[in-house]
Image (spheres, rainbow, N blue to C red):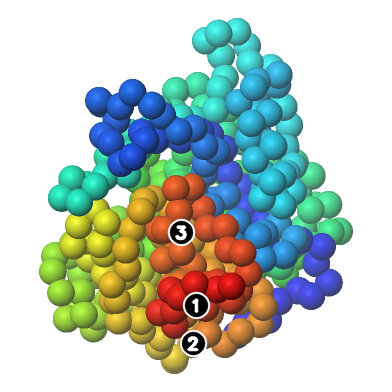
Amino acid sequence: MIELNNNATTALLTPTSMGIRLTPDEGQPFHNATNLKMQVTSAESNVVSVASYLGLPVKILSKFVEGSPVSRLILDNLASRHIDVEGPHIPQGGPWGYRHQINMADSGFGSRGPRVQNDRAGEVGRTLSTEDFDLERIFATEGVQIVHLSGLIAALSPETGKFCLDIARIAKKNGSLISFDLNHRATFWKDREEELFAIFHEIASLTDILVGNEEDFQLCLGVEGPEAGGEDLSAKIDSFKGMIGNAKLKFPNTKIFATTLREVISANHHLWGCIVSCGDEWQVVEPRDIYVLDRIGGGDGFVGGLLYGILKGWDAEKSSQFAWASGALAATLLSDYGQPADEEQVWSIWNGNARVRR
């Protein structure tokens, strides 16, 4: 679909701020939970997990608290996902010093939607900077096929915004493809709109693969698009195509644009679709019924599946189908990242085949 650097050591790389997610048992709301499941999380590691579980060499760049049991938990988990890790360990600085982010999220159930609250005070990942890594070695000597950037990290702090810009610039210089998932968060952007608008525009101008929902494109990049939410997504597909067309005019060097389509029937039943534009070619997966154990991470699974298809050299149609099914797979799991057993498991979801395999 697009040309890759086949001499690169790493297939997929992402900068991220790792943390933990606390989720009540059995779909209960957080405020009256008595038992919590703890798991390792970040949106960016969710994305790259699709490729790592399917055998491609994947790396994250992050920062850790020295001697922290949470850091050890995170590193052990990433190793179990077959993800290589690079980044410094810094002293905690006492009880009021650095720590890893905490994500408090219930899964919702039926008519009660999920609720998520982030506790990011003292987050070590907010200090990520170019000085923490040998980017020349990583990109020029070892090589990276695709670097995936997230708006969550670009907006996390002024330091991380500069870090993402530096990565995008050196990646472009050394022939890596750049993927950018806009991931707008209003709380991150408050009182920083002018600063972040400039950062996101420059990253998007260097990007080969640009992903976001209707709010992301409008709020991060000022691209006109449809109103968020509402019913009957199928009737709005032309307006989503119009949004992507507007994005193409602003960012003519971007090769692939993608957006997911989601209509929530209940917490456990969604209509799920996507639109992918590659050159003059459109791939539209009309919203289809999926059943949801936990919706968090479904969008990350979609991006991970799309990047996996690109890395495998698949065409736009096949990559879009695999992306849709990877997102649907993540929604069936209690972890917020897809853990495909193999490609066949993902294709079975696409084909609507939930029969037992013996």
- Image coordinates for residue 121, horizontal then vertical, percent: 44, 23
Q: Of the residues shown, which amino acid type is indicated by label 3?
A: Ala
* Residue depth check, mark 1 versus mark 2: number of the one nearer the observer: 1
Of the numbered discs 3 and 2, the one sitting upstream in the chain is 2
Q: In the figure, is residue 325 to the left or right of 160?
A: left
Q: Of the residues shown, which amino acid type is indicated by label 1?
A: Ser
The residue carrying pointer 1 sits among few (fewer than 14), some (14 to 19) or many (20 or more) residues within 10 Å by Cα, namely few
The label on residue 330 is 3
Q: Nearer the viewer, residue 308 or 252?
A: 308
- Residue furthest to the front: 358
Asked if residue 315 is positioned above or below residue 336 in the image, the reply reads below
The residue carrying pointer 3 sits among few (fewer than 14), some (14 to 19) or many (20 or more) residues within 10 Å by Cα, namely many
Rounded to the nearest angstrom, the CA distance separating label 3 from label 2 is: 20 Å
Asked if residue 302 is positioned above or below residue 334 in the image, the reply reads below
Q: Give the residue at mark 1.
A: 348
**Residue at the spot x=40%, y=88% of the render?**
282
Q: Give the residue at mark 2.
A: 317
Asked if residue 356 is positioned above or below residue 297 in the image, the reply reads below
Rounded to the nearest angstrom, the CA distance separating label 1 from label 2 is: 16 Å
- Image coordinates for residue 88, horizontal then vertical, percent: 73, 31
**Residue at the spot x=48%, y=47% of the render?**
335
Of the numbered discs 3 and 1, the one sitting upstream in the chain is 3
Quick one: SS at disc 3?
Answer: helix
Of the numbered discs 1 and 2, the one sitting upstream in the chain is 2
Q: Of the residues shown, which amino acid type is indicated by label 2?
A: Glu
Q: In the rendered view of the protein, which quadrant contains the N terminus?
A: bottom right
Q: In the figure, is residue 133 to the left or right of 347?
A: right
Task: Indicate the quadrant where residue 241 lies.
Answer: bottom left
Task: Indicate the quadrant where residue 186 lies.
Answer: top left
Q: In the figure, is residue 158 to the left or right of 313?
A: left
Q: In the rendered view of the protein, which quadrant contains the C terminus?
A: bottom right
